[in-house]
Image (spheres, rainbow, N blue to C red):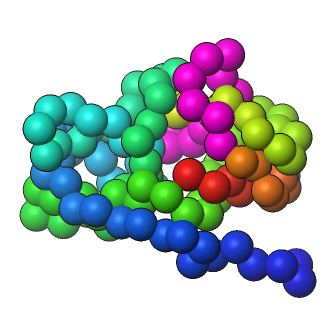
Amino acid sequence: MNVNFSGYNENVVTFMVEDTNVTMGTPVKMAGSHTVSACADSDNMVGVAVNVRNGYAAVQLSGYIEMPTQDTFTPGYCKIAASKNNSVKNATSGREYLVVSVEENIVGFIL
């Protein structure tokens, strides 16, 4: 690929982790004050854990990210929700994200 979106407007914040299901690459949601937990299937995500250590997670809240998917996406604004196994899927409601890259089983979008 001749184009790279990595680093665009990346914004990472550290949160406490509510459960041990949060690992690197996990879509996360707010679980309480200063705390995130792993998204369940179809949850709207606040971001993706990019590092997890000692009960804390560095969560990317904005910028370009690539996630595994079993769904088909079209470049442009799409509603995206968390799915099983640290992946994402098409959603009928919730937040829209700008999809800029679609490859086999990988979708790249701007958080």
Q: Is residue 86 magenta?
A: yes
* Left or right for 102, reference 48: right
Of helix, strand and loop, which mostly describes the magenta segment?
loop
Q: Is residue 110 above or below residue 11?
A: above
Q: Position of residue 7 (x, y in %)?
A: 57, 78
The answer to whether residue 84 shows anywhere in this view is: no
Magenta residues span 85-97
Q: Residue at x 65, y 49 (%)?
A: 68
Query: 97 or 51: which is nearer to us?
Result: 97
Q: Residue at x 16, y 43 (%)?
A: 35
Q: Position of residue 66 (x, y in %)?
A: 64, 59
Q: Position of residue 78 (x, y in %)?
A: 74, 35
The answer to whether residue 77 shows anywhere in this view is: yes
Q: Quadrant of the N terminus?
A: bottom right
**In which quarter of the view is residue 18 placed?**
top left
Q: Is residue 79 above or below residue 101?
A: above
Q: Is residue 36 above or below residue 102?
A: above
* Left or right for 12, reference 6: left
**In which quarter of the view is residue 3 placed?**
bottom right
